[in-house]
Amino acid sequence: MQKSEAITIVSGLPRSGTSLMMQMLYAGTMPVLTDNVRQADISNPRGYFELEAVKHTRHNAAWLVDAPGRAVKMIYRLLYDLPDDHEYRVLFLRRDLRQVVASQQAMLGKTGASDAENQRMMAIFQKELDSVDAWLKGRSNFTVLNVPHEQLINNSAHQAEQIKMFLNYPLDTSAMCAVVDPALHRRR
């Protein structure tokens, strides 16, 4: 494994708070990798903070050259595509699966999904989370901090301190907390 600064990966299920975490890191003065290809919208009025190249990591991981010492957002399924020659610190957002499903349906304009359909989606997500958790535990170049979404919203000062210690980075935790707007937490 190459000896260099770790790459901070913000990950989790879609609609789990990854954009909020990227906003917090950015406000806290951590450099972030984004390209603004995906613009802010009604679902994420402050922006998505994504890097399009991340989606193609399996076939082209060239973006990693600029990543050490920075944070980048990556959906959980893409973690498997990261090469082993880097050290990764993963901030893995954890949100109640009922809220994730409700938020996704609202974002996609779907209304009235049956309870059975919601339960099926939650079971799929839980199985996928269990798989990625097991995979991450077996990777010596990954360290993971699970960040509960509810605590990020309701106790942001404590969470910001935990993140600062985990990343061993001089984050401005007051600025991080100032980004948190409970009014944007609409799917409870």
Image (tube, helix red, strand yellow):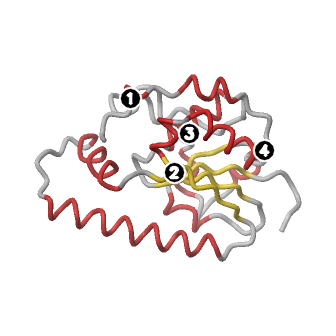
Q: Position of residue 25 (x, y in %)?
A: 64, 35
Location of residue 126 with respect to 91 vertically, above or below: below
* Residue depicted at x 15% and y 64%: 116
Judge left or right: residue 119 versus residue 151.
Answer: left
Are dots 2 and 4 in contact, CB under 8 Å?
Answer: no
Q: What residue would you read off at disc 3?
A: 21
Q: Nearer the viewer, mark 4 or mark 3?
A: 3
Q: Indicate the quadrant where residue 114 lies.
A: bottom left
* Frontmost residue, 27 versus 188: 188
Judge left or right: residue 6 versus residue 154.
Answer: right
Residue type highlighted by circle 3: Met
Q: Secondary structure at mark 1?
A: helix
Label 2 and label 3: CA atoms lie apart by 8 Å
* Residue depicted at x 76% and y 50%: 65
Label 2 environment density (alpha carbons within 10 Å; few <14, some 14–19, many ≥20): many
Label 2 and label 4: CA atoms lie apart by 20 Å
Label 1 environment density (alpha carbons within 10 Å; few <14, some 14–19, many ≥20): few
Q: Secondary structure at mark 4?
A: loop
Residue type highlighted by circle 1: Leu
Q: Secondary structure at mark 3?
A: helix
Q: What residue would you read off at disc 2?
A: 93
* Frontmost residue, 185 versus 4: 185
Q: Nearer the viewer, mark 4 or mark 1?
A: 1
Label 2 and label 1: CA atoms lie apart by 16 Å
